[in-house]
Image: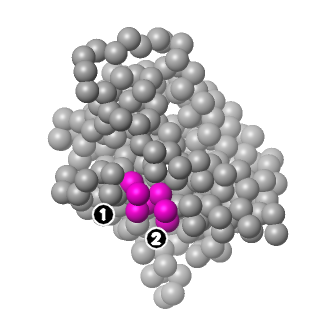
Amino acid sequence: MTALLLALGAGAVTGLALGALGGGGSVLAVPALIYLLGFTPAAATTASLVVVTVTSATALVAHARAGTVRWRAGAVFAAAGIVPAALGGLVSRHLPAALLTGAFAVLAAVAALRMLRPSAARAGGPVPVRASRVAGAGAGLGAVTGVLGVGGGFLAVPSLVNVVGLRMRAAIGTSLLVITINSLTALAARSGSAADVDWSAVGPFAATAILGAWDGKRLAARLPSGTLQRVFAFALLAVAAFMLADAVG
C-alpha cells in the first residue's frame, strides 16, 4: 500500500511539471523511481521513458487544442534526434549504475540553473534560423534522452526559443511533441531491458502523471510561468544534490 501511494504521489508531481512547464517530469520521475520505489538506475530510466512518453502525448493533446504546438518545427527538431536517441538507449545498457546516477544528478542541476535563469521569449518578428543549428540541438537532445532516460523538455524549451525562434508558450507546447518522439525512440532501443521493470508500480505512476499533466496545463494558464519555474528549480537542486552525494558516497 505504501509503495502504491508513493507511486501515485510521484506520478502526479511528474505530470504536473510536464503539463505546466513542457518538461522536467522525467528529472523528477527517475529519482522518485530509484529512491521511493526501489528501482535500479537502469530500470528507473527505462520506466521513466514509459511514463514520460504517455504523459507527454497526453499533455500534447491539451496544448494542441490550445493552438500552441508548431508541428513542422517540432517534427524537424525531433527528427534530428531519432538516431542519437536510439544509439543512446543502446549505450545506456552498458553503463555502471553509479555513473548513470551521477550523470543524471549533474543534468538535473543544470536543468535547475537554467530554470532559475530562463531565456526571454522572442518578442519580435521572424528570427533567422540555421538548419545546422536546429539539427545539432535536436541531435544533442536525442542523445541525452537515450542515455539518461529523460524526455529533455527542460533543454528543448530554451532550444526551441533560442535556436528555432519560437515564443515561450509555443516552445512549451512544441517541446511536448519533441519529448514524445524522442522518448518513444529511446524506449524502443531499450526494449530488451523492459523485463527488469516493476510494471505494477509503473502503472499507477503513469496514470496519475497523465491526470497531473491536465492539471498542469490549467495551472500554467493561471500562474506566472516564472513562479512555477522557480519552485520547480529549487526542488530540483535539492534532488540533484542528494543524487550526487549518493553516487560519490
Q: Dot 1: what SS? A: helix
**Res 15 visible:** no
Q: Amino acid at mark 2?
A: Ala
For the residue carrying disc 1, how many other residues have a C-alpha within 10 Å: few (<14), some (14-19), or many (20+)? some
- Near-viewer residue (4 or 232): 232
Please name the residue shown 42% across and 27% down the image: 162
Q: Amino acid at mark 1?
A: Leu
Q: Magenta residues? A: 229-235
Secondary structure predominantly adopted by residues drawn in magenta: helix
Above or below 246: residue 73: above
Residue 78 location in percent, x, y?
47, 28
> Quadrant of residue 163 in the image?
top left
Image mark for residue 211: 1
For the residue carrying disc 2, how many other residues have a C-alpha within 10 Å: few (<14), some (14-19), or many (20+)? many
Check residue 45 for magenta coloring. Answer: no
Residue holding disc 2: 10
